[in-house]
Amino acid sequence: MFRKPLLRVHSTMSNYPTALTEEKIKTTCPYCGVGCGVIAQANKQGQVTIEGDTSHPANSGRLCSKGSALGETVNLSHRLLSPMVNNKKASWDEALAEVANCFVETINNYGADSVAFYVSGQLLTEDYYVANKLMKGFIGSANIDTNSRLCMSSAVAGHKRAFGSDAVGPCYEDLESAEAIIVTGSNIAWCHPVLYQRIEAARENNDCQLYIIDPRQTHSCDTADVHLPIRPGTDAVLFNGLLCYLEQHACIDHEYINAHTQGFDAALTLAKQTAPSIEFVAKACDVSVEKVEQFYQLFSNTEKVVTLFSMGINQSSSGVDKVNAIINAHLAAGKIGKPGTGPFSITGQPNAMGGREVGGLASTLAAHMDFEQSECVARFWNSDKIAIKPGLKAVDLFNDIKSGKVKAVWVMATNPAVSIPDSNSVNEALKQCDFVVVSDCIRKTDTTRYADVLLPAAAWGEKSGTVTNSERRISRQRSFLSTAGEARPDWWIISEVAKRMGFGDEFQYQHVADVFREHAALSGFENAGNRDFDISLLQELDNEDYDALKPIQWPVNQENPEGTRRILTNGHFYTKDNKARFIPIEPRTPGANTSDTFPLVLNTGRVRDHWHTMTRTGESQRLSRHSLEPFAQCHPATAKQFAIKDKQLIRINSEYGSVVVRAELTDRQRQDEIFIPLHWNDQFSANARVDAVVNPFVDPISGQPEYKHTPVKVEPVKHEWFGFILSRHEYQFDELAYWTKLIEKDNWRIEFSDKEIKDINWFKKRIQNGHDYDWIEYVDEYNQTARYLWQYENEIQGCIFTATDYASLPAREWLSEQFSTTTLQDNKWQILAGLSSSGGVDTGSVVCSCFGVGENTIKDYICENAKADVNQIGKALNAGTNCGSCRPEIKSLIENRQHS
Amino acid sequence: MPEAPQKLIIIGNGMAAIRLLEELIEKQSPFDITVFGSEPHAGYNRILLSPLLSGEQTLNDVVTHPIDWYDQHGITLHTSKTVTDISASEKRVRDIDGDIYHFDKLVIATGSQAFLPPIPGNDLNGVYTYRTINDVEQMLSSCQQSKQAVVIGGGLLGLEVAYGLHKQGMNVTVLHRHTVLMERQLDETASEHLTAMLANTGLSIKTDVNIKKILGDEKVESVLLEDGSSIPAELVVFAVGIRPEISLAKKSDIDCAAGIIVNDQMQTSCQDIFAIGECCQHNDKTYGLVAPLYEQAAVCATVLNNETASYTGSVNATGLKVTGVNLFSAGQFCEDDSCQIIKLVDSANSIYRKLVIKHNRIVGILLYGDITDSRWYLELLETKQDITAISQTLQFGKQYCVDVQETVAACA
């Protein structure tokens, strides 16, 4: 029989990069702001092994599930490997000239503010520095904003209001020496797992109380002493109440206040008006009086208290106020600047801090200088066009793109089509924008689809530079892989465009260290101790020193040559009078309140094993197994009210847009509130881009969007037909009403459903694609199920299982394993049974990513070993013994068992 | 003096009769048994005629019960002796020689006759039906001189005989009136698979054709079709069905319809006269397959032995004895809304499996290419088991369902 040749006969699940060296290379993890040291080693085949760097002070060798799986994310299958202009491959020269010409032309015709850069906390400091310098120093606009606007800008603004500078005082060791840690607005167990592990390890040996404030009972609560599930958006009332409590219980550090602060009385007065009693606070926050009092007592009576805060505080239309409400309490009690104390902002991205340092936000200039210091920066940069006023913040930027005020935008290392609120409108904006440039590692993202020019950027493992973590620690990211295809480091790309725009003299960098030295020099330039960010000593590093640079915390200057563990220690702040400011806080309700039409509150956030828009973690089968599909968590009572069943598809609508995801009923969620993860987008699911729903309200000071509070309504989606596809090659079935895609060990998996049944021919048409596959068809009218399998020369290529009853679909695990054997047995049609003849075991969704241990496996063990604890389960099943990220989940499985 | 044993006469020495004898022997039944067979052979397995024709088995393999066996068990066998009359009232039969035999009990097991349709030329030399060892022997000798064979009828027997003749080196064309081969056992899809497979082995299959005439002078020369085309033939075999052999019963005033009418105890309208096998009709159904006749023989033996037993009808289950063809078919293939089909099609491997479900029970089984668990399905069909609990994995075989069945049992 004549067969058309198969394009790719064997699995192309892995498409490895080329090793630059086979030595072990110390580098830094590219995920969250903890900034863990990683040792990476690539072999000849380009396979990468990862271990934690025991010498790195941030993690001492620990890694979380995401960091551990970095080796799976360096494959090249989805990489952007050459420049493209109008979707056609182009040379670097052509692409760079196109970008430079378009920007120059737009600036000439419409002025400097008609162009913009939208950059990212994924960029290295050096990349960031060059981008910021080009826009603010030479194009002459401050229209460069970063996705840190979406996660950190409220903290930045709060710090600046209180301290006169974006100063994060504490260090990670303070979490280990604290006697109480208040975590508010952070699912630290999942979002900063290694910090969480450090806390947990320390708590095994001290009496540190862990107090979680969060509307959701996240897995961070599993090991906490108390969980305070406040009504969303009421944090400022709670912390204003704390300020009052401190005053009422004589816990105010008057000495500190008098010596080092201003504005206490005004702040206290407003706090008393807005949070007059514990009863008032409890009612406003919808929690018990006892729990509020317990929190206030803990804070007041404990000497060493750290309040760790993150997106739950920042992502609010009153985020800056919330930050200052927290800082107020710490200033008032003098719990700041000493070991084991302080308000501690934990950043979400690997280099959010680095971006803040170079001035990557539209609201800052450079090196922690603002626009009133533009002359200083202009002198240093030798620029006559420096920006003198703030530029457009992210949400405004995309509004102005939509309205046509901004005509050319260059997006670097981020995915705004997914991540900005009211993202349908952002997609519209990008679609109609005259000129869109995207520098990225990945070929197909929701954002790259709008690009006129695509520039291939070097990825983690290929690029070299520095990042700064949440405790001001600068660490090197080092390359150990050759740059893939024609990819180039971002600093090089930006410099080359700058040269072509006529700014060649100021962008003559030969080496990434050249950029770093200049950045270090600027931090010390005309800095007589009035700016906190100072790494001037590092401008002396030669290329070798730079390459060998060990993790170090800024400031690094003549006074602190070994770096600085803590800042703000001596009551010295960076305001004009060097005193900290109390900010009077009047708590505000969120941008929009619930209504009869939109009666529920949508909250968004991360899952444990995915990161941002999944461009990296979506490549990892290990990481894709923890949360298989986009979902909406909902309290059972709320679900009942809206006729929603567990695992059913539901549509969540706001005034702005909708998503369709699977309902997950859990009493960890407050009633009348919905939680949907932020990661899924149009590349991974039909309609799960949650920021299409999120309202575009922002904080008036920071411009940070209110991701944590959108009024929504919810309704069941009535689909009649359900199924899944496992396939060796990647397919996309956009016509299906619902689909979501994930990677598994040797196959892709699509879960889908639709209003009406589609038969084998529908799939054949889309899958054959010129190939001569053999199909096996199983149709069961009795159960209303159908199953298909296609193969090529006895190798299973894929299978499709469909049913009118979702619950009747078989477990996917066993089927997925069948893709690891290349040759099918004689009775391959029996694969369509969906389980082995000896009975398939459904191990459930994966709890432990490192060892692939499923929820059902752990439950079974607990069932048989009634007294099992987390360590015992680790010994028996390995679960939780590597990165430890899943230990809270294991603990809650044990507790659930004991309660049942 | 001990009471003389009762006399049992069996008319017919085919497979039903032999099975009845075996059952009686098993029960150590005290009858004095006399068997009349019109063929010259002792007991043989008619099913094995196909392998005999194809040369895959020998006459020795086919004759399962030689004369000695009858002697050993004290059974009187009259071969080549046809019974011509039955007197129910006098409890006597008369054979072709005019000899008279008295019976206490009589079993009619005259089987069936191959149907020879009234087509002009059906009496020419070289035209055969396919029923007996004699038919096979004549065909085999005809094969020695001839090359071209036409088999009329693409049912079970037609295909087996075609395959046999093909194995004997003949060019065989099968002509079938329906579009679907073995239309009683197969559906369109299975028929397509089978046609392709048989064509692959070298048979020429023509479906949806009607025969007009057999042409030839004394000896057959060709078969003329309604559409005017003709197919050269030195040998023509009719395999278009069987008719129950009821002429003896009819003339003896035993109630007959298409077959001899029997009740659940295999009794005819006359007391002490029974009928089993292809000649009988139970609940308006006649059977042409071996399994039902075995079941009838068992019931009949039990009743003769003065025990109680009831025959409640059989499921037509069959395979096709063509080497390389795995085929199993049982039950019915209704296509109305009350039935649900569970089917599996693996065309590349010529596997087609279909189960027909009605009211939560299997009512039809069609397995082609892979007949794994055919017997188990048949058991589920015959025992009318509710398959609700195992329906999800039913098609994949017993080993996929045992756990479920056990679990269901344990939970019940």
Image: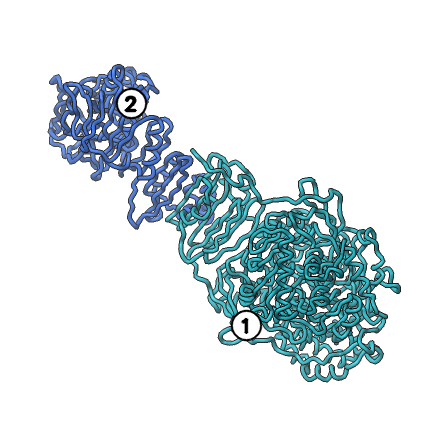
Chain colours: A cyan, B blue
Horizontal and vertical percent position of residue A580: 79, 76
How dense is the environment of label 2, judged by Cα within 10 Å: few (below 14), some, or many (20 and up)?
some
How far, Cα to Cα, is label 2 from label 1? Answer: 81 Å
Q: Which mark is residue B345?
A: none
Horizontal and vertical percent position of residue A157: 71, 72
Give the left or right position of residue A90, taking residue A152 as reference. left
Disc 2 with disc 1 on a shared chain: no
Horizontal and vertical percent position of residue B97: 12, 17
Depth check, front residue: A789 or A864: A789
Give the left or right position of residue B270, taking residue A521 as reference. left
Q: Count up the numbered dots.
A: 2
Depth check, front residue: A253 or B36: A253
Give the left or right position of residue A450, taking residue B354 as reference. right
Secondary structure of residue under mark 1 = strand
* Residue hosting label 2: B171
Type of the residue with mark 2: Asn
- Check the residue under mark 2 and report the chain it is in: B
Q: Which quadrant of the figure has residue B124?
A: top left
Depth check, front residue: A527 or B183: A527
Q: Which mark is residue A711?
A: 1
Q: Quadrant of the N terminus of chain B?
A: top left
**Which residue is pictured at 72% across the width and 47% down the height?**
A480
Type of the residue with mark 1: Pro
Secondary structure of residue under mark 2 = strand
Answer yes or no: is residue A267 visible: yes
